[in-house]
Amino acid sequence: MENVRRYRALASLCRQQAAYRPLQTWQLLGQAEHFEYLAEIALKAHFEVCNAQRDEDAVAAAAWETPVAA
């Protein structure tokens, strides 16, 4: 999650600089878009790991609750 914050901060910085540097506006806006893309990828990866762990926990819990024939 720390990487997501960093990427979004860098994207914000690029957009702010684009406002003050008219000759580099498109380059800076492109960099901002790239950083937002990286933030999105990092966020998706984080939630995939969280969801995978939750699925493993659910399978383990179900194994404990399986009825046993006597």
Image: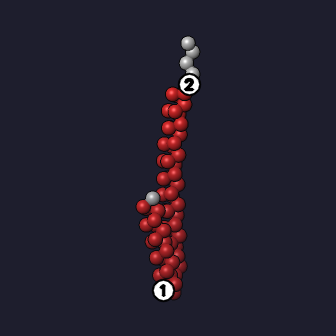
- Look at mark 2 in the image and give the residue it sits on: 66
Residue 27 seen in the current view:
no
- Name the mark on residue 33: none
Along the viewing direction, whichever of 63 and 25 lies nearer the viewer? 63
Location of residue 33 with respect to 67 vertically, above or below: below
**Residue 40's spot in the image, x, y percent?**
53, 60
The amino acid sitting under disc 2 is Thr
Residue at (50, 32) in percent of width and height = 60
Q: Secondary structure at mark 1?
A: loop
The residue mark sitting in front, 1 or 2, is 2
Residue at (49, 72) in percent of width and height = 11
Q: Residues within 10 Å of mark 2 (few under 14, many from 20)?
A: few
Residue 8 seen in the current view:
yes
Upstream in sequence: badge 1 or badge 2: 1
- Look at mark 1 in the image and give the residue it sits on: 21
**Residue 67's spot in the image, x, y percent?**
57, 22
Along the viewing direction, whichever of 30 and 9 lies nearer the viewer? 9
Q: Secondary structure at mark 2?
A: loop
The amino acid sitting under disc 1 is Arg
